[in-house]
Amino acid sequence: MNKILVFLEGQGTTLKRTSLEAISAARTLASATGIPYAGMIINGTKEQVKAVGDYGMADVINAKHELMETYSSTAAAKILHQVIQSENADIILFSANAKGLELAPRVAAKLEAGYIGDCVALEVKDGNIIANKPVYAGKSQITAMVNSEKKVFSLRPNVFTATKVEGSITITTKDYAPSLSEDDRKAFVTAMMKNEGKMDVLEADTIVSGGRGIKGTENYNLIENLASAFGGAVGASRAVVDAGWRPHSEQVGQTGKTVSPTLYVACGISGAVQHLAGMSTSKVIVAINKDKDAPIFKVCDYGIVGDLFNVVPKLTEKVKALTGK
Amino acid sequence: MNILVCISRVPDTATRILVGPDGKTIDTQGIKYVISPYDEYGIEEALRLKEKNGGTVTAVTVGNESSTDILRTALAMCVDKAVHIKADEKKDSFFVAKNLAEYAKEMNPDLIFMGRQSVDYDSLQMPSMVSEFLGLPSVSVVSKLTIVDGKATAERDVEGGKEIVEVSLPCIISCQKGLNEPRYPKLPDIMKAKSKPIEAREAIQTEEKVTVMSMAIPSKQRIGKLLGDGDGDVEELVRLLHEEAKII
Ligand SMILES: Cc1cc2nc3c(=O)[nH]c(=O)nc-3n(C[C@H](O)[C@H](O)[C@H](O)COP(=O)(O)OP(=O)(O)OC[C@H]3O[C@@H](n4cnc5c(N)ncnc54)[C@H](O)[C@@H]3O)c2cc1C
Ligand SMILES: Nc1ncnc2c1ncn2[C@@H]1O[C@H](COP(=O)(O)O)[C@@H](O)[C@H]1O
């Protein structure tokens, strides 16, 4: 093994948290293998590049091209491929988020490399990187290994911890000028529609989800209030989405989003396997359900057996008192 | 418009998963297999486009002998043609991607539909990989698609909202829930599908890029502390989250 490269995504004046998680994962791999690690970013700003220092990364390759002012995955993959080749890197890390999941397999295909997506652990054993990844919607997990010389992985958000290092680091930035033409932008982003004012379940530290037990869209303010007391996002079971009470963007589960927050609170959700598939790697799970035999209680850390209409408002008050939100 | 839909055969999502005797794959006994749910959106979208614009819809799967069952289901949903690329054992995604790309090259479709992910290994890579092998663009996790004059506009789910992506045809679209409501096959069509031909093909072999070493049922130990619903219980829950779990 030669060199680890981490794909970095900027967000405002800093990097996405998922990128910081990937840097930390790379640092762990680097110290286990003794090989260097660096970041690669496309059209990164000075501030964004500087953000890596707190997390122990000293080298960043900043690939700049004016055509990338509007994002295109085909073009981005072409750029990253050039950077990887010029750095002679062989371990490539992405975040398993919207962008990473599209890019990583593209880059792997260009490198004729094996790719393992959505990893929840990476470990070095006998000089090999062993990945752990949920399969069958998290009902089981595999350990797997990439055989090709170049190896590509993507990391499930919120599973790897982003850890800062002590002291300050001198960051060396290398500007890279990729070769790219209009032809490489066969698909490009023309607009972004933000879910106005709402925090996305994929980016939240705490998610409070409602299920059929909430009985109707008019009661969802209970869920919203609890979520805002935690400073978190609102999620939903499919029953709730199918009933038209909440948009699909909030659905957690096998046909919704896979989330891994620090805290997941399930209110009036029975805990069907397809729901569990989307949230079972959450760090702490709290369930509120009036049926003591509901399957959700088998997978929770803390459960309240009771009527959510009675429990949720009380809980909201008590959490508010503590968080001040 | 000629459309190719790639479909994957997976255990029904309600299936209980057990590790098989080899310790690397699942115990397949008694499992009911279905078309991977996201692929159904692909079939439906293709059929609707065909109903509107004419052309043909071909369904293809890479898999063992049993995989013909999902092709029969696709035929019952009224796709025009079914293609079975034969692979005896479970192969890695690179193998499947190469074979899908190989068939697509020959067929030269205007549009290729895949699912966002195949809900067995959740490998999350086929659309992007195949698109690279074909030199075509792709858009992943699409919940809305409009096609006008050889150009597609796709809405794709990203963190915090939706991206609008413009892409020229031919291209690959990976389907997300919300795209449409897949139809159920009608009884007469199910009967007719039984005698329709399925084209069988030999797979091209590739080097194994990813090796699965073991499989296990995750056993994250959860505390599982159950409380009642009195004021004291709610207070206790907040205390536990604060002091024991240390998350508020
Ligand atoms: C292919 C496929 C994909 C699927 N994908 C998903 C997915 O992505 N996400 C998903 O969530 N589901 C998914 N499902 C659906 C899943 O099987 C369940 O049907 C769904 O999760 C049930 O939602 P629920 O828990 O809200 O409702 P229910 O199962 O009806 O549970 C409601 C719960 O609320 C409790 N309750 C009722 N009233 C109260 C009260 N006053 N106080 C407290 N508790 C109360 C009840 O005890 C019950 O446990 C999928 C299914 C299939 C077949
Ligand atoms: N064996 C297969 N045969 C045909 N299509 C497949 C196969 N495996 C995956 N696909 C397609 O690729 C999509 C994404 O799968 P994956 O990348 O494996 O998660 C699926 O939804 C299918 O459309």
Image (spheres, helix red, strand yellow):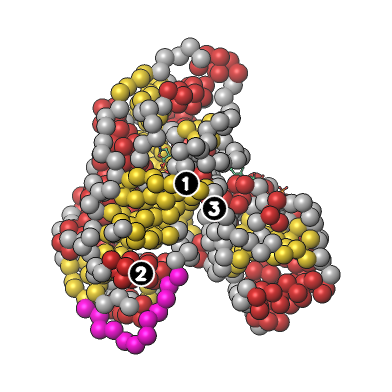
Badge 2 amino acid = Thr
A314 vs B227, nearest the viewer: B227
How far apart marks 1 and 3 lie (CA) works out to: 9 Å
**Is residue B138 something that shows in the picture?**
no
Residue where numbered disc 1 is placed = B215
| Residue located farthest toward the right when viewing the structure as drawn | B230
Local crowd at mark 1 within 10 Å, few (<14), some, or many (≥20)? Answer: many
Magenta stretch: give its range: A161-172
Dot 1 falls on a residue whose secondary structure is strand
* Residues at discs 2 and 3 both on one chain: no
Badge 3 amino acid = Pro
Number of callouts:
3
Residue where numbered disc 2 is placed = A28
Q: Is residue A170 magenta?
A: yes
Dot 3 falls on a residue whose secondary structure is loop
Left of A53 or right of it: where is A79?
Answer: left
Residue where numbered disc 3 is placed = B218
**Figure quadrant, ligand 2:** top left
